[in-house]
Amino acid sequence: MQLLRFLTTALLCMSLSCTTIRQQVQEQEAGMRRDMQDQTVKLEITLSVMRPSLLEQLARALGAEPDPNDEGEEAVLTMACSGVVVDKAGGVVRKPLSLIATAHHCLDVGPGTEMSDGSIVTAVIFVAKDSVGRQCGLTPILLGGYGPNDVATGVASCDLGATATLAEAVPQRQEQIYISGHPLGVYPGLVTTGYVSGWLNGWILLSAPAWGGNSGGPVYNSAGEVIGLLVRGSREYNHLTLAAPLGELQDRIKASGDWASFPE
């Protein structure tokens, strides 16, 4: 794809101003990046939790039995992830719905989940928000796992952003890719770029930068087609990232079945 773009640009430069051609190429890429942002949603996750009291935390740290009468302290936590619109339904007879694909680890939380600090989740609210500010509730419908199958789907109860196109194949090594998402919860989102470095234990290995909040965001090829979902990053090197592959994304969408009949 990049070689074709280069050859096309070179041929056009023979008959037109190279400056004009470069401007056209830049405008085309800017438009593609806008399309990526329009297809990407921000997931806002609000958790109500019961935290262990300071006395209970101290008792655990000392290896003592916590007081069974210590009910803990209530708190509210917020997290952010990213996702992508992969299908839509409704809009005439019933309200519109959007099928969202994201990372499994973003949706794998609910009442009774124990957090890393010992807090217990008592309630959770998922909200999906698109690039122009529309937002609605999101309900998880199909979870995945914590390896390269870190892909899940959910139904958003509104018409949310533009629908992405899935690629037919993953780009080859050193082909350019783009990651779209909401790193650190920023809104509107960001698009970063890099290259396919290869494969690592079933994941696609990428050189594009990403941060917390990018999880579940789409990874695009140079034609603006989704090739996977960003699911992992390195704490030491933010240019070392991992994506759940295209096949896992396709399988999860297919396995979501008749999601369009999701109850209102």
Image: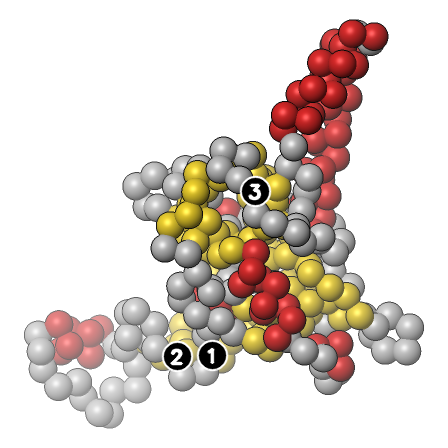
x 44%, y 61%: residue: 148
Task: Give the secondary structure at mark 2.
Answer: loop
Q: What colouring method underlies this structural image?
A: secondary structure
Q: Are marks 2 and 1 in contact (CB under 8 Å)?
A: yes
Disc 1 marks a residue whose amino acid type is Gly
| Residue 15, percent from left and from top | 83, 8
| Residue 217, percent from left and from top | 56, 53
The residues bearing labels 3 and 1 have C-alpha atoms spaced at a distance of: 36 Å
Disc 3 marks a residue whose amino acid type is Pro
Q: Earlier in the sequence, mark 3 or mark 1?
A: 1
The residues bearing labels 2 and 1 have C-alpha atoms spaced at a distance of: 6 Å
Task: Give the secondary structure at mark 3.
Answer: loop
Q: Quadrant of residue 119?
A: bottom left
Q: In this orientation, which residue lies closer to the viewer: 250 or 209? A: 250
- Residue 43 shows in the view: no
| Residue 5, percent from left and from top | 69, 25
Q: In this orientation, which residue lies closer to the viewer: 30 or 13? A: 13
x 64%, y 75%: residue: 256
Q: Earlier in the sequence, mark 3 or mark 2?
A: 2
| Residue 236, percent from left and from top | 30, 41
Q: Which residue is mark 2?
A: 113
How many dots with numbers?
3
Q: Which residue is mark 3?
A: 171
Q: Which residue is mark 1?
A: 110
Circle nearer the viewer, 3 or 2: 3
Circle nearer the viewer, 3 or 1: 3
